[in-house]
Amino acid sequence: MTSTRPSRSRPRAAVIYNPIKVKLPELKAEINTAATTAGWARTRWYPTSVEDPGGLIAAEAIADGASLVFAAGGDGTVRAVAETLRGSGIPLSLVPSGTGNLLARNLDLPLSDLATAALIGFTGHSRPIDMGVMSIEREDAPPEEHAFLVMAGIGLDATIMANTSAMLKRTVGWLAYVDAGVRTLATAKPFRLHYRLEGRSLHSVNVSTILFANCGSLPGGLELLPDSSVDDGKLDLAVLQPAGLFGWVRIWRKLRWENGSLRRSRIGQRIITVTRGRKGTKTISYLRTRSVTVRLDEPQGVELDGDQMGVTRSVTVRTDPHALLVRVPATDRA
């Protein structure tokens, strides 16, 4: 059988794509043109499926000798491919084709420009970024370890992901999450958890959701964790404790106004400082650590980059520093 590996002088790229979310003829045209211009061997193509969202075929692409892997799809496709590429030294290049495209947003990559996405893949710079790793413990089952790129969560956010309409996502994009959020808030109830940051004592708290983040920008101009960084070797936590509907209004105001617009000016930063000094119910708390263990009094749903992972009573979450190489523009050396 003829080997599928590229010659040493001509590297080969692989494209792992979600056939439901990409326009394959247009994608192939841009990728093949960019590969030819860059002097690469002919690109190999791997479609995802319901049974394999990208992880197994990413391993196949590596075995076939891929020097670069494109992920063309939504956040689920990107996470599955990245989980396999973790620690391999083979760079991942993004072709955003989904609803959230959260990693691309946080890296300021183009969201709807196939030609530029292809160019970045073949001529860009490989930037090392951290990955989050969650060990999920379930009753009567061994722990499962999964990696994530942007954000994982327990509680309300997992319920929102589960309640988001796939059809609505196709028609209105990220606004589908808003619809699910409004419907979910009506029946949401706080739950109790106990967490221990690395090197710290145990704390107990009632929350609506707890988020573990590698980076913090969300669609719609919302900044959940404005000080987080994809390559600082730390995990950022957001603990949400809203008191009723007005508590959620305060959280939205913080994410949209305080964490966004106000932080960009000196006057705004003064307003933030004054506001923090006022007494009142704290709706959101920020923590930073390399690892954290969380135990729940009652089972809760868990999600990683929007992928549902069932329910859990206990998790350990840590950061894997510089575990993944991601292609960014050659001028971006941050």
Image (tube, rainbow, N blue to C red):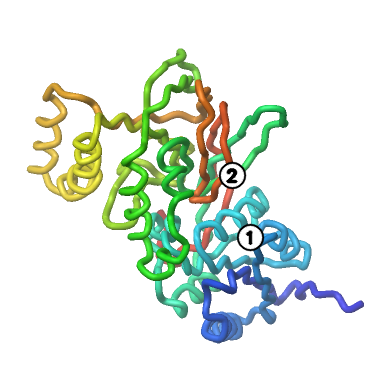
| Residue denoted by label 1 | 53
Pick the quarter of the image with the N terminus. bottom right
Q: CA distance from mark 1 to mark 2?
A: 14 Å
The type of residue carrying mark 2 is Ala
Is 33 in front, or is 293?
Answer: 293
Is 85 in front, or is 212?
Answer: 212
Question: Position of 269 compared to 209: left or right?
Answer: left
**Residue 321 on image: x %, y %:** 54, 40
User: Any mark on residue 316, and which?
Assistant: none
Residue in the picture at 44% in, 46% down: 230
| Residue denoted by label 2 | 147
Lower sequence index among marks 1 and 2: 1
**Residue 179 on image: x %, y %:** 33, 55
Name of the residue lying farthest toward the top = 201
Query: Which of the two discs, 1 and 2, sits closer to the camera?
Result: 1
Question: Position of 129 compared to 86: left or right?
Answer: left
**Residue 149 on image: x %, y %:** 51, 49
Indicate whether 31 appears above or below 277.
below
Tell me the quarter of the picture where residue 329 sits. bottom left
